[in-house]
Image (cartoon, rainbow, N blue to C red):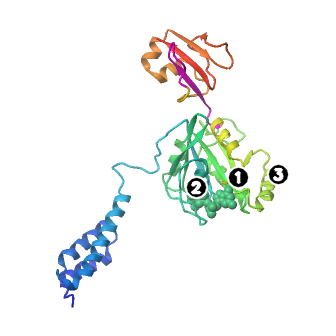
Amino acid sequence: MPANLTPQYYEAEEAYKKAQTVEEKQAALQEMLSAIPKHKGTEKLQADIKSRLAKLRQESKKKKPSKGYDPFNVEKQGAGQVILVGYPNTGKSALLGALSRAKPKVADNPYTTSIPQAGMMPYEDTQVQIVDGPPVMPDNVPPGFLGTIKAADALIILIDAASGDCLEQLEGVLSLLWEKKVIDISAEEDEVVAPQPFLIVAGKIDIPEAAENLDLIRELKPEWEIHGVTVKGDGLPELKEKIFRMLGVIRVYGKAPGRTADMERPFILKKGSTVLDLAEEIHKDFASNLKSAHVWGSSLFDGQAVARDYLLHDQDVVELQM
Ligand SMILES: Nc1nc2c(ncn2[C@@H]2O[C@H](COP(=O)(O)OP(=O)(O)OP(=O)(O)O)[C@@H](O)[C@H]2O)c(=O)[nH]1
Ligand SMILES: [Mg+2]
């Protein structure tokens, strides 16, 4: 049966072909649907337009961020936030997948990742947030991502040990981060205000060329400590420990008087925190009404009474009384 399409339909179809945005395409398809003569001869075409509309709806649902949403603003979770920074294709997404339960897209072509994605890395009784981002190079930092890097607690600079340009990758990222005043690699003190801690990690050490490349870098740059890993597991337990230590935090367990300590959910405090800092973390009132504190920890006898300025250690158990 001939379709006998109307001029309005052809006009709408023309608008659809020229449409640039999802919204324009949707409007044109709606117009086509209302202008199409409804009979058996156009049934297939009607179904086709409807399916294209449904696809666009899905697409715009996926893409439409809530108001004010910024993909480069990654909300912090856990004991600290660590960002993976490196050249394209160095294995950042694969490493996030190996350290956490996140399933980022991993591919053998560069520029696979375009916006940050996070996963939680379990470490003993706590978790560290690992953020994988788009690749960075000295002349190419994705807009918005520098802000993500600056807001993080620490960084992992990932180089591809199997690549012939792994030294260039390392020097490129280090100089970029130093120029942007994120890390301090100059001999002069106070060059960068509040520099971020970082680890240098060399991935893909299972590939035969990696050993020779790493030996060369270590010879040329003995001052840089480089930690080798593969996403299959080599070096990962040590890396997890280094990541946690790099954050400069301690875990402290709270204990209510007369009860056993809550060893499941430690409070995370900065190294150098005191009993008073812990009380403030729990509640402001707690800090002002604090009567006494007892600590079970490595450097004390069990349940020793301590002053409010007592410096806490990782894995101390603390009982506070108001
Ligand atoms: N043999 C080996 N291959 C790896 C390892 N880590 C990553 N790869 C491979 O390296 C390629 C790139 O990995 P990705 O994780 O996508 O790299 P990326 O740094 O996230 O890349 P961009 O998102 O483009 O910046 C993939 O083919 C991975 O399978 C590793 O430890 N060993
Ligand atoms: Mg990636």
Q: Would you name the residue on which mark 1 appears?
A: 202
Residue behind label 2 places its C-beta within 8 angstroms of ligand 2: yes
Of labels 3 and 2, earlier in sequence is 2
Query: x, y (%) of residue 244?
Result: 63, 37
**Circle 3 or circle 2, nearest the eye:** 2
Tell me, yes or no, whether the highlighted magenta stretch contains residue 259: yes
Query: x, y (%) of residue 257?
Result: 51, 13
Residue 140 in view here = no
Q: CA distance from mark 1 to mark 3?
A: 15 Å
Among the 4 quarters of the image, the one containing residue 122: top right
Q: Amino acid at mark 1?
A: Ala
Characterize the local packing of mark 3: few (<14), some (14-19) or many (20 or more) Cα atoms within 10 angstroms. few
- Vertical placement of residue 274 versus 225, above or below: above
Where are the magenta residues, as a range?
246-262
Q: Residue at x 19, y 88 (%)?
A: 4
Residue behind label 1 places its C-beta within 8 angstroms of ligand 1: no
Q: Residue at x 50, y 58 (%)?
A: 114
Q: Residue at x 35, y 57 (%)?
A: 64
Q: Amino acid at mark 3?
A: Glu
- The kind of secondary structure element at disc 1 is strand
Q: Which mark is residue 219?
A: 3
Quadrant position of the N terminus in the picture: bottom left
CB under 8 Å between discs 3 and 2? no
CB under 8 Å between discs 1 and 3? no
Of labels 1 and 3, earlier in sequence is 1
Q: Amino acid at mark 2?
A: Ser
Q: Residue at x 55, y 21 (%)?
A: 261
Of labels 1 and 2, earlier in sequence is 2
Query: x, y (%) of residue 251?
Result: 59, 28
Q: Would you name the residue on which mark 2 appears?
A: 93
